[in-house]
Image (tube, helix red, strand yellow):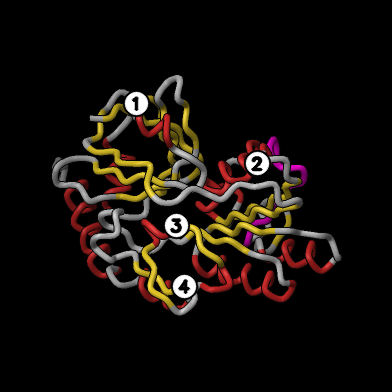
Amino acid sequence: MYKILKKRTLGPKIREYVIEAPEVARAGKAGQFIVLRLHEKGERIPLTIVDCDPTTGGVTIVVQEVGKSTLEMGDRYGEGDFILDFVGPLGLPTEIERYGTVIGVGGGLGIAPLLPIVRALKGAGNEVIGIIGARSKDLLFYEDLMAETCDELHVVTDDGSYGRKGFVSDPLREILSSGRKADRVWAIGPAVMMKACVGVTREFGVPTIVSLNSVMIDGTGMCGGCRVEVGGEAKFACVDGPEFDGFKVDFDLLIARQRFYAEEEACALERYLAARKGGSK
């Protein structure tokens, strides 16, 4: 059992949790993830590690309540409660080197996994340019932490309610078009956002790393649910990734696979909402 040490709201249906998991806290690195299960009948949820504190044993994760299990976590689990399983660290860590000037692009919930990566890149001596964005101001989070880490930070919102109006790919294009040198780009967020960023960086020949959020079940490569196509070869995001060369990823296939269980997920959410309305536990 794993205790919830802290819980706070970052935005509408966006929660930050600190889970007491000492072994994960000692071993976790930027780019890796965990898989949690709330209870014996719960589904396995993969979530990126945002921060690790070996002193307290706390592991920070960010959860967006979009489906049955994430909504249940927000509804029923608070500080002092325990969750059944918390497995990790899983996946390969980010390759942190001194590249020179790097750009980190985070869209929506992708800001959470981007934060530890830019921190590690900054710690390795890189100049870090950050770009973060969300659909609207209320969905934007970690701006203060990103500003503390990055040498330069650009903020955008789709609706223009905060920062500049536009998409994260807009300042990315402007920076590269200006002739400024960029040695590597990390782009993390919805698949369509990462695809757009890769479309920009490909024009300028800047190596780009993306973190793929394909459907995962066991997180160990056994089920094959997270299969993606990279460079014409089948890869498993959970063990071969989650980070890959963005130029080689088949984003259209990734987007299609993300929709495979849309009907089942919708049914599970509908049943949970109905039970919650009726007061069922």
Q: Amino acid at mark 1?
A: Glu
Q: Secondary structure at mark 4?
A: strand
Per the model, the C-alpha gap separating discs 4 and 2 is 30 Å
Left or right: 197, with 47 as reference point: right
Q: Which residue is mark 1?
A: 79
Q: Amino acid at mark 2?
A: Met
Image quadrant holding the N terminus, namely top left
The image position of residue 33, as x and y in percent, is 41, 46
Q: Amino acid at mark 4?
A: Val
Q: Secondary structure at mark 1?
A: loop
210 w.r.t. 40: above or below: below
Q: If you read the primary sequence from the N terminus, does the residue marked by circle 3 or circle 2 appear first?
A: 2
Contact (Cβ within 8 Å) of mark 1 with mark 3: no
Per the model, the C-alpha gap separating discs 3 and 4 is 12 Å
The image position of residue 51, as x and y in percent, is 49, 35
Q: Which mark is residue 230?
A: 4
Q: Which residue is mark 3?
A: 242
In front of the other: 265 or 110: 110
Q: Residue furthest right?
A: 179
Q: If you read the primary sequence from the N terminus, does the residue marked by circle 3 or circle 4 appear first?
A: 4
Q: Amino acid at mark 3?
A: Pro
The image position of residue 170, as x and y in percent, is 71, 66
Per the model, the C-alpha gap separating discs 1 and 4 is 40 Å
The image position of residue 63, as x and y in percent, is 41, 45
The question of residue 92 being in magenta is answered with no
Q: Secondary structure at mark 2?
A: helix
Q: If you read the primary sequence from the N terminus, does the residue marked by circle 2 or circle 1 appear first?
A: 1
Q: Which residues are magenta?
A: 146-158
* Residue 136 in which image quadrant: bottom right
